[in-house]
Amino acid sequence: MTDRNAKSHHPGKEAAGRAAAELVKDGNIVGLGTGSTTAYAIKALGEKVKKGLDIRAVVTSYQSEMMAIQAGIPLTSLAENPVLDIAIDGADEVDANLNVVKGGGGAHFREKVVSLSANKFIVVVDDSKISDTISMAIPLEVLPCARELVQHQVAQMGGEASIRPASRKDGPVISDNGNFIMDAAFGEVPNPQEFADKLSNVVGIIEHGIFTNTDKVYIGYKDGKIELRE
Ligand SMILES: O=C[C@H](O)[C@H](O)[C@H](O)COP(=O)(O)O
């Protein structure tokens, strides 16, 4: 997993984020994901809004809310706009069939709600996120009182779920929705759709980090070049 607190400029992430921002059209309602790569898309959209682009955005976290406000992007909600034209978001791992794993920042629940509300779901990553097959531990948002039950059910599926420790406080990472974030290691996940369905049946998991609804992925490289997969 990348260093989430790294503040240094990342040309690959910037190239991918800016490329996705180019897809946004005047009048669009836009879903804004969370994380360091989406941050570049939010910045680029803010620059376009200052030049007259008329959009409204639905955020996926306190982080993207703060970034959008700072960038001057007008906000709306799914209550007011249940169907979004486009959602742009980062990912932690992308497989050869554009299945992605998200939730390295614990925001995948609202990110999934927003991505499934959008007509187009665009993923932005740097090339370090690409792999043939999903193999990272899958982030889970878990109801706190169900943590032991979730660990037990994940073990029955052949995995091992652990509570994600917070880095600047004692105890677990608490999501923006007030739940625990756990990470479940299963090794390689060769059939993400089937596996996602199984995880959705685990009682106590509010949402898992496997997304199978990606339309396009922009991959940014260190030299600023971009690759589009769709
Ligand atoms: O929970 C966090 C989100 O799913 C992020 O979009 C994902 O972790 C990728 O973040 P980054 O672009 O910072 O690597």
Image (spheres, grey):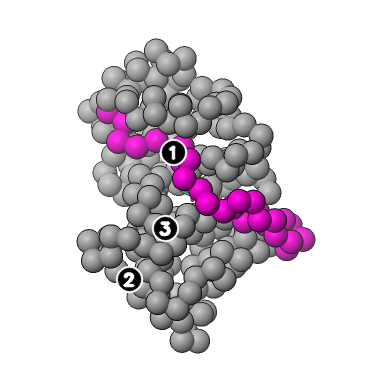
Q: Nearer the viewer, mark 2 or mark 3?
A: 3
What residue span does the magenta drawing correspond to? 204-230
Quarter the N terminus occupies: top right
Extreme-right residue of the structure? 223
Q: Position of residue 222 (x, y in %)?
A: 74, 57
> Circle 3 sits on which residue?
119
Q: Give the Cα distance between marks 2 and 3.
A: 18 Å
First in sequence, mark 2 or 3: give its number: 2
Would you say residue 114 is visible in this rendering? Answer: no
Query: Does 56 appear above or below 133?
Result: below
Label 3 Cα neighbours within 10 Å, binned few <14 / some 14-19 / many ≥20: some
Query: Mark 2: which secondary structure?
Result: loop
Whole-Å distance between the Cαs marked 2 and 1?
25 Å
Q: Is mark 1 within 8 Å of ligand 1?
A: yes
Numbered mark located on residue 83 in the image: none
* Residue 212, horizontal then vertical, whole percent: 48, 40
Q: In percent of the image, x 39 and y 19: which residue is there?
A: 154
List x then y, in percent, for residue 141. Answer: 35, 37
Q: Earlier in the sequence, mark 2 or mark 1?
A: 2
Q: Helix, strand or loop at disc 1?
A: loop
Q: Is residue 216 left or right of residue 79?
A: right
Using the numbered discs, state the Cα–Cα distance from disc 1 to disc 3 in whole angstroms: 20 Å
User: In this figure, which residue is indicated by the disc labeled 2?
Assistant: 75
Q: Residue at x 37, y 40 (%)?
A: 173
Is residue 206 a member of the stretch shown in magenta? yes
Examine the rendered structure and indicate whether residue 4 appears above or below residue 22.
above
Residue depicted at 46% across the width and 37% down the height: 210
**Residue under label 1:** 209
